[in-house]
Image (cartoon, grey):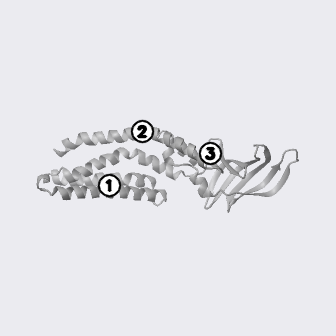
Amino acid sequence: SVWQVLAPAIILAAAIGFISFTVFNPLAAGLYATYDRLKEGLVRNDVAALDISEGGFWLREVKDGRATIIHALAVRQEDAALSMSGVTMLITGPQNELIRRVEAPRGTLRDGKFELEDVWDLEPAQPGVRHATYSQPTTITLTQIQDSFGDPDMLSFWELPEFIATSQASGFSALPHRLHLQALVATPLMLSAMVMLAAAFFLTAQARLAAWTMRAAAGIAAGFLLYFFSQFTYALGLAATLPVLLAAWAPAAIALLLSLAFLFFNEDG
């Protein structure tokens, strides 16, 4: 039967998909991350770097030889602004000497500036000064901070869960990384669906009487349609229009179910 013919191919496709995201993906992610670091070091001079760890939120901006380093114990996105708590701002000069240290219990990034409240302003060899508010201009935007999370492709399958958990604990949704993780896990199902899709066009009882040219064209068109649909749902997932699970799993599941229905109808119907 067609099921006996397809079983080895489906098992092989699923195994290749499993190996691809558990073995080959970490290798590709490591090489991609190395390439990105080399590019950043060779091409860009003024760098805005972001790091999120269990110790909180770190942001570094370099401009005109001066560096501003910001640490916050916790952050929370509020519409187009970033709300921070437990803020420490360090400003260093061209020789990495400390110029100013600013501490505040609360702060916000909005409209091209950091706005801090109830500020303790400290400068070397100067007495500390209290300010009700303190404003620090910046070229960093909330969009740039979100983009600074890095391409999900630079993180391996084994690193993604920890990164997502840390990002969510820091106040970010990590939507691209959650979607990328689900897409990786869905790889075996997607490859199995592609096998079933090909079988629906070429392994039917009427194969000898069919117009092979038309079948081949229809099969290729179905493959392109599956690819386009998967990219479309992925884009909707990134835009938060579709839930992450639906955006990552729907294309493969729909293709697999349609192929199964067609084969059942022709073989067993």
How far apart are labels 3 and 2 at the CA level? 26 Å
- Tag nearer the camera, 2 or 1: 2
Q: Along the line of sight, which residue is nearer the eye, 257 or 220?
A: 220
Point out residue 267 in the picture as x, y percentages from the top left corner: 16, 51
Instruction: Tell me, for residue 254, which label it has, or none.
Output: 1
The residue singled out by tag 3 in the image is: 51
Name the secondary structure under disc 3: strand
Q: Are marks 2 and 1 in contact (CB under 8 Å)?
A: no
Residue furthest to the front in view is 42
Dot in front, 3 or 2: 2
At label 3, counting other C-alpha atoms closer than 10 Å, the crowd grade (few under 14, some 14-19, many 20 or more) is some
Residue shown at 42% from the left, 36% from the top: 23
Residue 54 relative to residue 195: left or right = right
Q: Distance between the Cα atoms at labels 1 and 3?
A: 38 Å
Q: Say whether residue 87 is left or right of residue 269.
A: right
Q: Position of residue 201 (x, y in %)?
A: 21, 54
**Which of disc 3 and disc 1 is earlier in sequence?**
3
Instruction: Name the residue beneath numbered marker 2.
Output: 24
Q: Is residue 140 visible?
A: yes
